[in-house]
Amino acid sequence: MSSPPLPLRAQAYENFRQQILQANVRPGQFITQRELVQLLDMPLGAVRELVPRLEAEGLLRTVPQRGLQIAQVDLKLIHNAFALRRMLECEAALHFGVVATDDDLAAIEAAHLDVVRRARRGPIDDALLSEATALDWGLHDRMIDTLGNALASDIYRVNSLRVRLIRLEGSTMEADVLPWVMQEHLWIVQALKSRDPVAIVARVRHHIDSAHRRVLGQPRPPMPWSMENLL
């Protein structure tokens, strides 16, 4: 049985979210309601209902005599967004380390290793980068959703849109980022498999700090682990 269609305001929000994920809107960009109607392919009424929600979530603001502006990226937004990631995702990873089955973790590990092996064989094309991006965000989403807390999931997903705006990398990760992300994820998976809460938190923090430093143009923190023994 197919799912019932989303209400128009929910469709409008999902369409806006996809525009961020696909990098079709940029931080600080000004856009009129008419342009937003065209971009989202939604009626004006649905867009008008959408705007207050986006303003409340800090994704959009109304500028008098200028129109609507996509959230601007500054150091405060960057630091706050990654601080929120640390709070939510460390707690979620701890819980995931308790409830995830051995089969769950083995499947996650296998999917990451498959991407790494294919990347090493080359070429790293758009299809592989899209798959790696889905795998990257998919693990974070899954750990958050395993908490079973709708409020936490909603807060996390809004914040993930802010992070996407900050990263400015389009809809997929870049080829030079793929090995780092996969290695950091596999390092986290090793801690999850060992059910070691201290290691889980330390490695998730390392992974988020690594992404935080990258968007600031700083070198990644060194990681005392290699995935070579898994390949």
Image: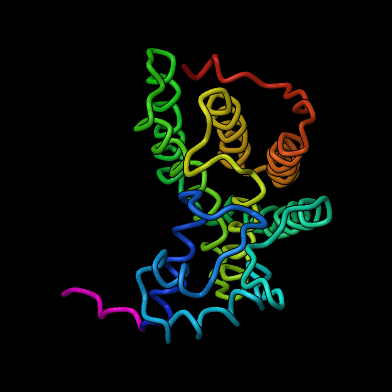
The one of 144 and 122 positioned closer to us in this rendering: 122
- Magenta-colored span: 1-7
Q: Image height check: is 172 above or below 66?
A: above
Residue 89 image offset from top left, x and y in percent: 66, 54
Residue at 74% across / 51% down in the picture? 82
Q: Image height check: is 193 above or below 65?
A: above
Residue 226 image offset from top left, x and y in percent: 62, 18
The colour scheme is rainbow
In the rendered structure, does residue 113 fall within the stretch colored magenta?
Answer: no
Residue 139 image offset from top left, x and y in percent: 51, 47
- Predominant SS along the magenta part: loop
Residue at 64% across / 52% down in the picture? 163
Residue 208 image offset from top left, x and y in percent: 70, 43
Number of numbered callouts drawn: 0
* Residue 2 occupies quadrant: bottom left
Q: Which residue lies most toward the right here?
A: 76
Q: Image height check: is 125 above or below 100?
A: above
Residue at 44% across / 14% down in the picture? 120
The one of 122 and 198 positioned closer to us in this rendering: 122
* Residue 92 occupies quadrant: bottom right
Quadrant position of the N terminus in the picture: bottom left
Q: Which residue lies most toward the left here?
A: 1
The one of 61 and 213 positioned closer to us in this rendering: 61
The one of 170 and 191 positioned closer to us in this rendering: 170
Residue at 58% across / 54% down in the picture? 98
